[in-house]
Amino acid sequence: MPQRRHVARAAVTASAAAACLALATPAWASATVTNPTLRQAGQHILASAGGFNQGFGECAGAEQQAAGEDIWVFIWPGNGVESVDAVNIGWDTDNDGTADTFKTLAEGHFTTDNGAKKVWFATPAGWKLESGESTIHGQVPQDKFNLTHTCAGTGGETPPTTPPVEETPTPTPPVEETPTPTPPVEETPTPTPPVGETPTPTPPGESGAPSETPSPSTSVGGGAGGGSEGGLPLTGVAATSIALTGVLLIGGGVVLMTMRRRRDKVTFTS
């Protein structure tokens, strides 16, 4: 009888253990270790960026936000995450576009939102979000976790999102110098001989002697051969008298010929 009781107890214990193993199997199967990365990596996000900033002191769990602090809230979406085991978030603090300062899970704060795991960090105001890595037990869609929202601080210097534009100085127009007037150079006019006067060429052998220009002849007429080389042509009364003489001579010849013909025609009768 006691032996049967031991056998029954062993059977019950084995059944209970089997049931526990059966119930635990889904939990073990879901506890896969994965390494989601930040979806907004490389976007150079400021806490004051539109679409993320909920306003100073409005982030849940961070109601005691200091004036010079930015609050950053990250979420691992879905209900398939059992635990967030490690986080490494990088910020740009010198405005060169790359992460140079990092915070780990030890500096973060846990919270939940309808079963989804969240972690938030506080940083000096003006840092830019650049990168994020994590290790979790579980899985998230597309193996990404997200920056869900921020609460920008009210103090501190915010690095500019774009490099300052250098202003090009307006060039000053040069002062125009008034040139000193130069007096005009007086040109000595070349002497021009009077109109109608022909300069007399210098006779050979008398170079260097000043030549006198003869006055133009005012006489008209003259014999046919009376003019020297270079004299004026025969015009006026001389040409007219020669023409009249020729006409008279021709007329006289005609009269003489007519009288002769008449004489030859006269016949004498006795």
Image: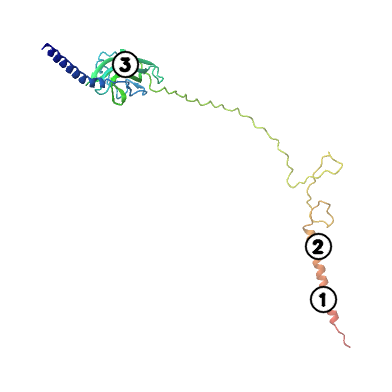
In front here: 202 or 138?
Answer: 138
Q: Secondary structure at mark 1?
A: helix
Q: Is residue 252 left or right of residue 168?
A: right
Q: Secondary structure at mark 3?
A: strand
> Pointers 1 and 3 in contact (CB under 8 A)?
no
Relative image position of residue 81 (x, y in whole percent): 26, 21
Instruction: Report crowding for label 1: few under 14, some 14 to 19, many 20 or more residues within 10 A (C-alpha).
Output: few
Q: Which residue is mark 2?
A: 242
Q: Secondary structure at mark 2?
A: helix
Using the numbered discs, state the Cα–Cα distance from disc 1 to disc 2 in whole angstroms.
25 Å
Q: Which residue is mark 3?
A: 86
- Residue 71, image quadrant: top left
Residue under the image location 82 percent in, 71 percent down: 252
Residue that protrudes farthest toward the right in the picture: 270
**Image vertical order of residue 191 relative to residue 57, above or below:** below
Using the numbered discs, state the Cα–Cα distance from disc 3 to disc 2 in whole angstroms.
146 Å
